[in-house]
Image (cartoon, coloured by chain):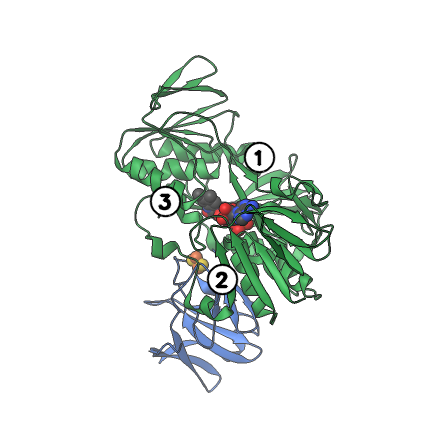
Chain colours: A green, B blue
């Protein structure tokens, strides 16, 4: 392998470029990214960057060491197709980047809801700059969707002193990732912090012509809004791969070593649906740690080696900061798993363990990092599930 | 010198934290002892609770790795090194010298 092209210049793409060099790949590394910005960190966009306490510099992912890696950065460049016959990444300008290996790291984008000015999604730095400026003006915010990003934006807006309402179609927020019982606990977090939470009613429309005035619910209610933030999930950026022959199922399908249907093409991070040893099935994760760690496995695969990290990395992990509390989750939950609080109390800090056939499969903690860490280790040592 | 514990109480692959201001942790990497400030330079996680792999400790919160020998972070999101400290073993007891070793880059 003489040239490896990484498509996507965010956490997973940067981690792939670093991992290739760390694993002593001496050939050419090209990183293509359609954003104009150098790689930056997304989690602060809904937290410390949004409230103004973190600067652009703080959220940059690039360090002085990266300048030593001899990477050919091509920012502001969009890949339009992957041509497997010649193994070329075709740019939207028509230019063909012929390459020996490809790392797909195109991530995901926010699912949108069309609307007038004042309606936002939050995925990119540009999104965050605009939203931050609007939040500075104050007023009332309606957040559509009580998932992690919705909850974090609500928490930040509340801290900035705005009036906040969260609307969620499902009866319980975060029932998908956390289950109904623990979703209820998250609902409680909103309530305790002075945020109105309306659940079980879909949004039927956005009211306002030149600028949004309200959010209309299916039951006829209209919730006044100066600012609307739509947090209804993310869509993997994989459409450009149509015609490449790669299997797409949500994300780009890979095995546990991140290898796609084409052995010289690997996929990592939010755009990949990878076989996960811990879950025993193919899953697409939208977790920061996965986008950091999977590329180390993928780089090894491209270079014909097997990563020694694979076992521990396979236990999914994410965190979320809401209303001054820190949520941590590890493992893979399914409907039907039993959940039990093993420490603390639900209105303060606690650890809850999910079990399937009496085996621990996942753990959720709020402000209990030490005990959470112990359970996370336990999950890592449990090996393959199901 | 800050007393830590008996040498036998830090097994290979494990860490012992000394609560102080700031807290310091001593790690045993295959018999070699290393001491660093326990609090991650990114946010407020305890590195003693992290994952030890060779001479690297991975933060349990956001997975930055630090080299125990130099204190340097080797991956995001942390950018600032942790301070390292000299470890002394005397009569089967482990001590840490309170003054931090200057960061080497
Ligand atoms: C506001 C916010 C808060 C978050 N908070 C947390 C958190 O607290 N904890 C947690 O675990 N995770 C969190 N996440 C998730 C985490 O940030 C993602 O999992 C991570 O960014 C995924 O990295 P990635 O590199 O795979 O994808 P992305 O970060 O989505 O990057 C993909 C890059 O590829 C580019 N691209 C796409 N298509 C093309 C193309 N055709 N050609 C060229 N370039 C292309 C994109 O523009 C983008 O720059 C958060 C995400 C957001 C948005
Ligand atoms: S607190 Fe250690 S990496 Fe964030």
Residue A176 disc label: 1
Q: How many C-alpha atoms fall within 10 Å of the one at disc 3: few (<14), some, or many (≥20)?
A: few
Q: Quadrant of residue B72?
A: bottom left
Residue occupying the point 44% across, 68% down: B17
The N terminus of chain B sits in image quarter: bottom left
Residue occupying the point 54% across, 67% down: B52
Say above or below: A218 vs A355: above
Please provide percent x and percent y for residue B103: 37, 76
- Disc 2 designates what residue? B49
Q: How many C-alpha atoms fall within 10 Å of the one at disc 2: few (<14), some, or many (≥20)?
A: many
Is residue A318 at all visible to an observer of this figure? no
Say above or below: A238 vs A206: below
Mark 2 vs mark 1, CA separation in Å: 29 Å
Q: Chain of mark 1?
A: A
- Disc 3 designates what residue? A324
Q: Chain of mark 3?
A: A
């Amino acid at each position: 392998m003489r040239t490896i092209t990484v498509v996507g210049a965010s956490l997973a793409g940067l981690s792939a470029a670093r991992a290739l060099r760390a694993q002593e790949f001496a050939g050419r590394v090209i990183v293509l990214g359609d954003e104009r910005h150098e790689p930056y960190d997304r989690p602060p966009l809904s937290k410390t960057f949004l409230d103004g306490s973190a600067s652009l510099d703080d959220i940059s992912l690039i360090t002085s060491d990266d300048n030593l890696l001899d990477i050919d950065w091509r920012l502001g460049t969009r890949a339009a197709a992957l041509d497997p016959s010649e193994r070329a990444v075709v740019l939207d300008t028509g230019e063909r980047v012929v390459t020996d290996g490809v790392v797909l790291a195109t991530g995901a984008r926010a699912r949108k809801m069309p609307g007038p000015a004042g309606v936002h999604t939050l995925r990119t730095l540009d999104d965050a700059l605009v939203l931050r400026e609007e939040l500075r003006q104050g007023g009332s915010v309606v957040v559509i969707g009580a998932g992690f990003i919705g909850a974090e934006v609500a928490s930040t807006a509340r801290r900035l002193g705005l009036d906040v309402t969260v609307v969620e179609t499902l009866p319980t927020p975060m029932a998908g990732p956390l289950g109904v019982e623990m979703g209820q606990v998250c609902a409680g977090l909103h309530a305790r912090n002075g945020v109105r939470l309306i659940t079980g009613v879909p949004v039927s429309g956005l009211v306002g012509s030149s600028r949004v005035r309200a959010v209309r619910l299916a039951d006829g209610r209209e919730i006044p809004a100066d600012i609307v933030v739509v947090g209804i999930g993310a869509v993997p950026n994989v459409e450009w791969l149509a015609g490449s022959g790669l299997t797409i199922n949500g994300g780009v399908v890979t095995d546990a070593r991140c290898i796609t249907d084409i052995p010289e093409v690997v996929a990592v991070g939010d755009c990949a649906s990878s076989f996960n040893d811990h879950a025993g099935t193919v899953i697409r994760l939208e977790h920061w740690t996965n986008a950091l760690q999977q590329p180390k496995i993928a780089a090894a695969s491209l270079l014909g080696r097997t990563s020694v990290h694979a076992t521990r990395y396979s236990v999914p992990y994410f965190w979320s900061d809401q209303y001054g509390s820190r949520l941590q989750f590890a493992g893979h939950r399914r409907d039907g798993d039993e959940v039990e609080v093993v420490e603390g109390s639900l209105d303060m800090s606690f650890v809850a363990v999910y079990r399937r056939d009496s085996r621990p499969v996942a753990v959720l903690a709020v402000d209990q990092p030490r005990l959470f860490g112990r359970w996370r280790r336990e999950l890592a040592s449990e090996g393959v599930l199901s | 010198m800050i007393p830590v514990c008996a040498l036998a109480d830090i097994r290979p692959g494990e860490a012992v934290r000394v609560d102080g201001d700031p807290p310091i942790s001593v790690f045993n990497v295959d018999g070699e002892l290393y001491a660093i400030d326990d609090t991650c330079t990114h946010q407020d996680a305890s590195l003693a609770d992290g994952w030890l792999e060779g001479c690297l400790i991975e933060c349990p919160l956001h997975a930055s790795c630090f080299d125990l020998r130099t204190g340097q972070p080797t991956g995001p999101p942390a950018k600032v090194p942790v301070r390292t400290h000299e470890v002394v073993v005397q009569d089967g007891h482990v001590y840490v010298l309170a003054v931090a070793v200057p960061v080497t880059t």
